[in-house]
Amino acid sequence: MGKTVWFAGENCTIQWGKYPNGRVAIQLMCADGPMARATVNIPEYEPDFDEVLIKDYSENEGMLDALVKAGIVKDTGKRAFSGYVTIPVCKLLVQPEWR
């Protein structure tokens, strides 16, 4: 069974994916279907191989804390910038099935 994450009052499971440029995508799935896309892809930002950009704003506020508590990611302290938002750059602590 996959890792679980408590987010927005629901117990969710991780669904791994890839963006078109090959970077890791994380989606949270709940009993009713997709809950939230946990990651963002900023093509002009070059994360390390084991890093992901976490969407922790707007409807995803609290996502970083939820993923850290679940042991999925560790906040590196680095930030990427996109428009008006600052995006946490995190080290993956759990590897997708294909790696």
Image (cartoon, rainbow, N blue to C red):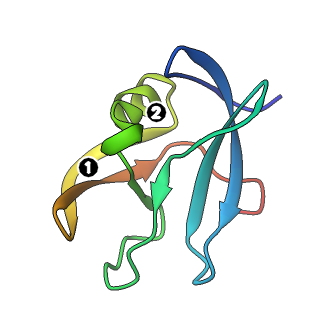
Looking at the image, the residue that sits furthest to the right is 1
Q: Is residue 4 left or right of residue 2?
A: left
Give the residue furthest to the top: 9
Please name the residue that numbered disc 2 is placed on.
67
**Image quadrant for the N terminus?**
top right
Label 1, on which residue?
76
Q: Looking at the image, which is closer to me, 40 or 47? A: 40
Percent position (x, y) of residue 4? 65, 25
Q: Where is residue 39 in the image (x, y as percent from the top left)?
A: 48, 55
Quadrant where the image shows the C terminus: bottom right
Q: What element carries label 2?
A: helix
Q: Which residue is drawn at 44% across and 41% down?
A: 73
Instruction: Say left or right for 96 vs 84.
Output: right
Circle 2: residue type: Leu
Query: CA gap, disc 2 to disc 1?
Result: 13 Å
Q: Is mark 1 on a helix, strand or loop?
A: strand
Q: In this view, does 9 lie to the left or right of 58?
A: right
Q: Residue at x 61, y 78 (%)?
A: 22
